[in-house]
Image (spheres, rainbow, N blue to C red):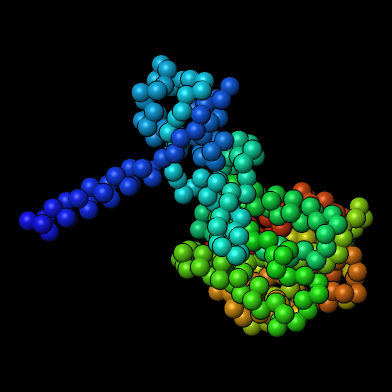
Amino acid sequence: MKSVSFFFFSILFCVMVWSQKDHYTVVAEQGDGIFSLLRKQGLDPVEHYVEFVELNKDDLRKGSQLQLGMSYKVPYSLDSFKKTGVRVDMVDGTETSLFEKELSKMSLKSNRLKNAVYYLLIENHVQENSGFLQQMTKKLAADLMVQGAQIYVLDMMNSITAQEDTVDIGTDKLGQCVDAVNKRYLKHNKKYQRVLLLRLKNAVDDSKMNLAFSHYQNSGDGQRFADNLQGVFKKHGINKRGEETEGSSIFEDKSTLFLAKNLLPTVTLLTLDNNSESINGEQLHIRVDNKRFAQLLGNGILKDYADLEIED
């Protein structure tokens, strides 16, 4: 009898916990309608409209109108932009949404990348004008999210510095990045997953910068990803510098090799630098514009994914 009672209360407890977790509440603000409120929470209003109305049917005026200052239940959803675009703290593993105010202007354009996960690693070696890399990464993340992708951004500014030029110095810090990415890789183990390491080697000014793509020499997937990205920049008339090669170069520095050997998903490196002599292999020359830069990267990522689908 005791075992039956225990089983019953266990089921009841699980139901209560689940019911508490299926939604959260927000307060309707001036000008809010159901569509705008859902968008501000990162949700597709078309997909979640009926569920929202059902959750809040007793608090809606005329069946569909929100009341100013009233609290409304918003369904938790894994497809919320608050969930599909997050910044990961490499120390404690916590996730925070990449976007807040911008959510009201974001809407799903397609599901082309619904089975794709991208890890954008920011490695910034300078403090001046560091906003360029942050802004460009957020723009790229948004462009991929509205195509259905899951995006994780890991800021390595405090983990790798220009002075840490040997693997011994940075192993522990790099290990935090590896742990954070690999845990999420296992969570999404049936999906297409790629790591793009964005490395800024010196300060950004208003002129042009040199960029180069590279991959791990033992990774065919990494080479294809790098070559697809590089190909899009070439196709759009980005000037070339240095000796032209058949494709992207290979990793040479110790920190990137460490990541390539320990991360589960494929890694590709994009290096940005004002000094053309510090980049090996073929270089492209691009004017500094984070919106245009993010657009070209996004196009390359879409091309790489489309090529994979064709092969499959």
Image quarter of the N terminus? bottom left
Question: In terms of depth relative to the viewer, which is nearer, 250 or 128?
Answer: 128
Residue 128 in which image quadrant: bottom right
Picture layout, residue 226 above or below residue 136: below
Question: In terms of depth relative to the viewer, which is nearer, 211 or 223?
Answer: 211
Can the viewer see residue 297 in this picture? yes
The tally of labels here is 0
Residue 30 at x, y percent in the picture: 58, 22
Question: In screen coordinates, is 20 left or right of 156?
Answer: left
Can the viewer see residue 220 in this picture? no
Picture layout, residue 236 above or below residue 65: below
Question: In screen coordinates, is 22 left or right of 304?
Answer: left
Q: Residue furthest front?
A: 2
Question: In screen coordinates, is 24 left or right of 253?
Answer: left
Residue at coordinates 86% horizontally, 64% vertically from top-left? 202
Question: In screen coordinates, is 156 left or right of 65?
Answer: right
